Amino acid sequence: MTRATGRLPEVDTTALTDEQQKLHESLLSRPEIAALGLVGPFGVWMHAPDLGLAMSRLGGKVRTATSLPANITEVAICTTGAFHHAKFEFAAHRGLAIRAGVEAAAIDRLGAGEDPGFEGDERAAHAVATEILRDHRISDSTYTDAESRFGAQGMVELLTTVGYYCLISTLLNGFDIPLVDGMTDPFPDSP
């Protein structure tokens, strides 16, 4: 049995429907599933396996199959997680961002609601994510700067990353996904 959230029932991986089994098998190749089980959004997806499979495929593309360098992807993900105060998302991706070369202190400032002090491409990615989340638009100057760095394809990928992680943050917050052992609560003052 795997506990998905405080709001959804446990998923018994020994008694899966055909659709759940297909999703579960596709998730087993992910290192985070091997290490932690069906935590975070993965356990939630098991309750709507057809959607879960589609979300998993898109998430795999967003994380590993774009033209964007990993540090840029992780800045966008962490910016989105911080904006939504998605505890699990931010805690899970903090380490991934650091492994991708993002300065730990910058990620911690981002989580604290401070100016992270990103520079170069990371600053541009953060600006795009921040403006689209906060203002629902991107200013011409921010867009022009980011597009000159990432190109048209990169901009589609960057905004898709932000949008995908808005979806994930919504699931995590809506189902009150708990942190797992070893994760530090990045927003201890948030419910």
Image (cartoon, helix red, strand yellow):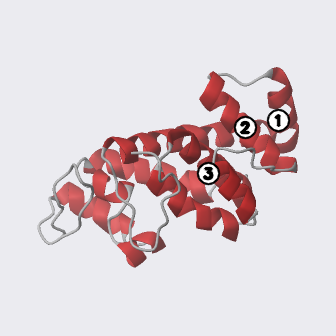
- When asked about the image quadrant of residue 69, the answer is bottom right
- Counting other residues with Cα less than 10 Å from the Cα at mark 2, is it few (<14), some (14-19), or many (20 or more)? many
**Numbered disc 2: secondary structure:** helix
Distance, label 2 to label 1, CA atoms, is 6 Å
Q: How many marks?
A: 3
Q: Position of residue 91 (x, y in %)?
A: 52, 60
- When asked about the image quadrant of residue 129, the answer is top right
Amino acid type at image mark 3: Gly
**Numbered disc 1: secondary structure:** helix
Distance, label 3 to label 1, CA atoms, is 26 Å
Q: Which of the two labelled residues, at mark 2 and mark 1, occupies the earlier sequence position?
A: 1
Q: Residue at x 32, y 48 (%)?
A: 176
Name the foreground residue: 145 vs 57.
145
Q: Are marks 2 and 1 in contact (CB under 8 Å)?
A: yes
**Residue underneath mark 2:** 155
Give the label, 3 or 1, closer to the camera: 3
Q: Position of residue 59 (x, y in %)?
A: 50, 52
**Residue underneath mark 1:** 147
Distance, label 3 to label 2, CA atoms, is 24 Å
Q: Is residue 6 left or right of residue 66?
A: left
Amino acid type at image mark 1: Glu
Q: Is residue 157 left or right of residue 125?
A: left
Q: Is residue 105 left or right of residue 171?
A: right
Q: Position of residue 40 (x, y in %)?
A: 38, 58
Name the foreground residue: 129 vs 66.
129
In this picture, is 140 found above or below 99?
above
**Residue underneath mark 3:** 111
Image quadrant holding the N terminus, namely bottom left
Residue 30 makes an appearance in the image: no
